[in-house]
Image: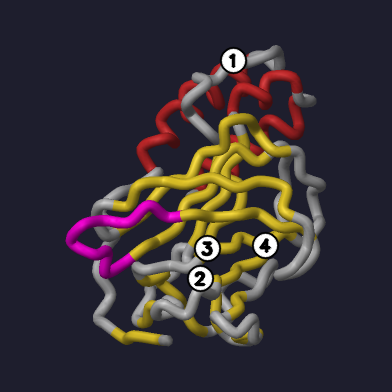
Amino acid sequence: MIRRFPFRPSSQSHRSRAGHGTACFFVLALAAGPCALPVHADVLDQENAAASFAWRRCGGTGRSLFQSFMPRFTPLAAVALDIREVPAEGEMAHIRVRIGWTQGAVIAETVAAVTADGWTRFAFVEPVAVKPGTDYFIEWVQPRSWWAVASGNPYPRGEAYNCGEILLALDDYNFRTFAPAARVESRPWAEVKAILSGALAR
């Protein structure tokens, strides 16, 4: 089921997180030593936040929507979805992360309360080990609200699937994935710089 509407900016943004990375980035630029980022300031890894003029849900069919992604970093700390047309009573949204394909093994799942249109964050109790360069699938289980979808293949590292698990070749759902910044401090300097540069560029 698809619904088309004029684009409305999301009610939340993760851009404010870049401020934590900025201070740390300049410290690292002066001295290539360890840099302890705030534990709560997760690093943005994968993202599709393109302007969306259509939303999808499964309309009470009991089915799921899927978006694949290919992480650069491990572990996976959280996922965020761009959710629209939330019911007045809200929704307790349930997501899973699968490996390899839409029916691959579930490596993580969690729930989050959705109360307003915009980005909803789904944090995992413990960061989930993932393998960079491998395909993973975000599954939104039986959505009652709508997931913002953008056309033109805006996220070439993954693919979107509708409620019938049929590939939407030119579409991608809006999503974000995050790695825990607390793990960055043990990485080599070149990799830390790449992570922070990527976060600041978004």
Give the label on residue 140, or none.
Answer: 3
Kind of residue sitting beneath label 2: Tyr
Q: Is residue 18 left or right of residue 98?
A: left
- Look at the numbered disc 4 and give the secondary structure of its residue: strand
Marks 3 and 1, how far apart in space?
33 Å
Q: Nearer the viewer, mark 2 or mark 3?
A: 3
Q: Quadrant of residue 54?
A: bottom left
Q: Is residue 161 above or below residue 94?
A: below
Q: Nearer the viewer, residue 189 or 39?
A: 39
Badge 2 crowding class, 10 Å Cα cut-off, few under 14, some 14 to 19, many 20 or more, is: many
Q: Nearer the viewer, mark 3 or mark 1?
A: 3
Magenta span of residues: 84-93
Residue at screen point 49% across, 54% down:
94
Kind of residue sitting beneath label 3: Trp
Most common SS among magenta residues: loop
- Look at the numbered disc 1 and give the secondary structure of its residue: loop
The answer to whether residue 56 of the structure is visible from this angle is no
Badge 1 is on which residue? 36
Point out residue 14 in the picture as x, y percentages from the top left corner. 40, 44
Q: Quadrant of residue 180?
A: top right
Point out residue 25 in the picture as x, y percentages from the top left corner. 56, 26
Badge 1 crowding class, 10 Å Cα cut-off, few under 14, some 14 to 19, many 20 or more, is: few
